[in-house]
Amino acid sequence: MTNQKKKTSPKQAVKKTNEKLYFVLAAIIAAAVIVLFIYPGLINNEKNDEVYYMFKKEGELTITDSASSVKAKLDIEIADTDYERQLGLMKRVSMEERQGMLFIFPTENMQSFWMRNTLISLDMIFINAKKKIVTIHKNTKILSDQSYPSTAPAKYVLEVNAGFTDKHKVNVGDVISWK
């Protein structure tokens, strides 16, 4: 018995090489699609920096006066991590009238916000640790680095559409609660 190697024809060799090439190419394309799905910002194009975020309801908030009469109720998105607080309502093109974002800080301190990359005008409501409103900035200027500071220490900040506080007669001294 002799060891005889099976000879491959040139056509078969080209076919095997093409099959390997197609397999490697398919694997590269699949990996690229997966990477771009996970990290969509890797593609540079004119619209790349126009990533917009949508509202995600995470609770319900009520604003009452000192006599516990309800002034307003709204759905809230909560920003309670450093990243969420930094992002805030940036890159949002709209927000419903009965929606807002509640920023929760670890400790009560003087707070200051700005409107960089914020496309909708807001009312900013600063709230102390006792959940009492201490400062309101109305009709903030969009896309601005202007500072909007609290006038007293605050642990919470509620951002709502501009005009909300006037429409619902929300004032300093009113109280918030949420679930």
Image (cartoon, rainbow, N blue to C red):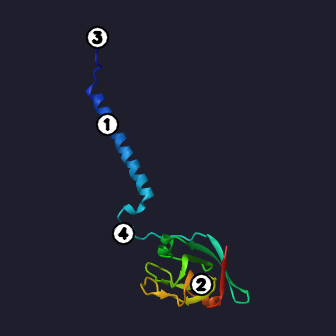
Q: CA distance from mark 2 to mark 3?
A: 92 Å
Q: Position of residue 126 (x, y in %)?
A: 56, 85
Lower sequence index among marks 4 and 1: 1
Residue placed furthest toward the left? 10
Residue 127 - label: none
Give the residue at mark 2. 128
Label 2 to label 1: alpha-carbon separation: 69 Å
Q: Kindly identify which residue carries mark 4.
A: 46
**Do the residues under discs 2 and 4 have CB atoms within 8 angstroms?**
no
Q: Earlier in the sequence, mark 2 or mark 1?
A: 1
Q: Nearer the viewer, residue 131 or 21?
A: 131
- The secondary element bearing badge 2 is classed as loop
Q: Which residue is mark 1?
A: 18
Is disc 3 surrounded by few (<14), some (14 to 19) or many (20+) residues within 10 Å? few
The percent position of residue 65, horizontal first and vertical second, equals 69, 88
Q: Nearer the viewer, mark 2 or mark 4?
A: 2
Q: How far is mark 4 from mark 3, CA to CA?
A: 67 Å
Say which amino acid is labelled 1: Asn
**Does the residue at mark 2 contact the one at mark 3 (Cβ under 8 Å)?**
no
Tell me where residue 21 appears, x and y as whole percent.
32, 39
